[in-house]
Image (cartoon, helix red, strand yellow):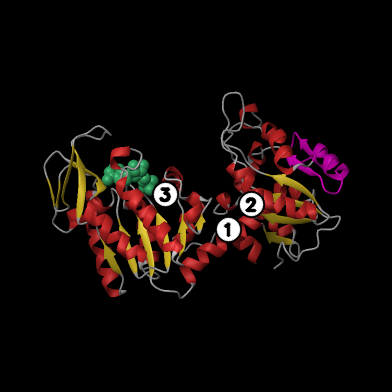
């Protein structure tokens, strides 16, 4: 396998698959350019080392071919500004226009190709479409972790056409290194904190993590399914009655695997699902009829924080409560701060999955943890122990 750092880019045209799926407002202005910034180190590396960059990406989910709302043309100006480099644009990602622009592009320049999803072949992983894309460049770099779990033409199939000239970009390398560090290094203790709404969506992750972790902290709405399964009274808290047995099975498996599961011991209840609801802190097994637990309580915050503070590796996915409501954000916030402290004291911490990233950003702590993953679905599948096609295509 090649590495970006050792590959010779001199006079090479590098096809780079990035994730430029950025939000645009009604005027087609970018409202959050995080994803573009995240791909810049790879693009600039190619350019600084004598190559030129041909960028492939999707934007949104176009259904019927080209649509202005999903055109990458809206990103050209900003990419030019961020990279301080001339950016050409091809209105089609394959065909004569793309070929001509890429051929005419000078060393050190960038060509941004139009949305690959304007061709329905992309998401089908069509080989002929991947081959057409591959003809534009001399090597292939996958830097789109956000779509690494998809076997699409531009993320996976294209790699076949570069058996000796394919590699990960800086962002992909960072994601994989961080995930591997947490899941497969032998530093201990390793603590996973899993929260969020539903236990059903996290079962494969929990089952895989039970093979790896020393401590599993369970918070958020999913905790109440466990509490009910153990005989607790949960009022009208979120529950999945079809998964009570699954919860007990998970607990049993944890005992077998020597994993300590930590459930909340108290909860902050509300009399309605609203930020202005009346609050009451109660024992986790004793939630009154009509009340619902929307956050973990004070004691749980303390217990969970102690576990986190004594950990060497930390993985966090999913909030401890309805952190979007300021009156029920305390549990999630205290977990975020405990992770910050543990990181300061030398632990390695990885945060991932949509809502935990939103939470860590809300509390302005993204720079205080070791790594914040950019890939929601891709990270979750990695945590489930699945082989991601986009990664496999580069490694094999
Ligand atoms: P998920 O996408 O499964 O990670 O769930 C994230 C969502 O779970 C967030 O929007 C939270 O507001 C929500 N959530 C967390 N704790 C609770 C709870 N106790 N009751 C209801 N929703 C919750």
- The disc placed on residue 155 is 2
Instruction: Depth check: give the residue in front, 254 or 275.
Output: 275
Specify whether residue 101 is painted magenta.
Answer: yes
Which residue is at 72% across, 50% downward?
A: 43
The secondary structure type at the circle numbered 1 is helix
Cα–Cα span, label 2 and label 3: 26 Å
Decide: marks 1, 2 in contact (CB < 8 A)? yes
Magenta stretch: give its range. 86-113
Which quarter of the rendering shows the C terminus?
bottom right
The yes-or-no answer for disc 3 within 8 Å of ligand 1 is: yes
Cα–Cα span, label 1 and label 2: 8 Å
Which quarter of the rendering shows the N terminus?
bottom right
Q: Relative to residue 286, is residue 142 drawn left or right?
A: right
- The disc placed on residue 389 is 1
Q: Relative to residue 12, is residue 225 drawn left or right?
A: left
Cα–Cα span, label 3 and label 1: 25 Å
From what the image shows, is residue 384 above or below residue 238? below
Q: Relative to residue 43, is residue 330 drawn left or right?
A: left
| Dot in front, 3 or 1 | 3
Q: In the rendered structure, which disc, 1 or 2, sits on the residue that comes first in sequence?
A: 2
Instruction: Depth check: give the residue in front, 329 or 245.
Output: 329
């Amino acid at each position: 396998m090649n590495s970006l750092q050792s590959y010779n880019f001199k006079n090479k045209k590098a096809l780079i698959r990035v994730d430029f799926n950025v939000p645009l407002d009604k005027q087609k202005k970018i409202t959050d350019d995080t994803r573009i910034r995240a791909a810049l180190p790879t693009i600039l590396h190619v350019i600084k080392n004598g190559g030129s960059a041909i960028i492939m990406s999707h934007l949104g989910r176009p259904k019927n071919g080209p649509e202005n709302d999903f055109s990458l043309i809206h990103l050209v100006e900003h990419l030019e500004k961020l990279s301080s480099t001339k950016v050409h644009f091809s209105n089609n990602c394959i065909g004569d226009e793309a070929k001509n622009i890429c051929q005419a592009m000078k060393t050190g320049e960038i060509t941004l190709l139009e949305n690959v999803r304007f061709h329905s072949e992309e998401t089908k992983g069509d080989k002929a479409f991947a081959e057409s894309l591959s003809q534009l460049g001399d090597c292939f770099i996958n830097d789109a972790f956000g779509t690494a779990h998809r076997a699409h033409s531009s993320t996976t199939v294209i790699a076949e056409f570069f058996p000796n000239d394919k590699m990960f970009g800086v962002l992909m390398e960072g994601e994989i290194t961080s995930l591997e560090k947490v899941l497969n290094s032998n530093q201990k203790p390793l603590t996973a904190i899993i929260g969020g709404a539903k236990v059903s969506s996290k079962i494969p992750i929990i089952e895989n993590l039970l093979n790896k972790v020393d401590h599993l902290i369970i918070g958020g709405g999913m905790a109440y399914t466990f509490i009910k399964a153990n005989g607790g009274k949960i009022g009208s808290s979120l529950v999945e009655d079809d998964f009570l047995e699954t919860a007990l099975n998970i607990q049993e498996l944890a005992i077998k695997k020597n994993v300590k599961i930590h459930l909340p011991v108290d909860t902050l209840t509300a009399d309605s699902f609203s930020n202005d609801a009346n609050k009451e802190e109660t024992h986790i097994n004793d939630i009154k009829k009509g009340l619902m637990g929307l956050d973990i309580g004070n004691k749980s915050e303390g217990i969970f924080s102690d576990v986190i503070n004594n950990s060497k590796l930390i993985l966090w996915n999913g909030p401890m409560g309805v952190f979007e409501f300021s009156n029920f954000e305390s549990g999630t916030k205290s977990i975020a701060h405990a992770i910050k402290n543990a990181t300061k004291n030398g632990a390695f911490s990885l945060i991932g999955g949509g809502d935990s990233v939103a939470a860590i950003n809300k509390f302005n702590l993204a720079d205080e943890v070791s790594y914040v993953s950019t890939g929601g679905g891709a990270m979750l599948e990695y945590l489930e122990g699945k082989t991601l096609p986009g990664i496999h295509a580069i490694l094999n």
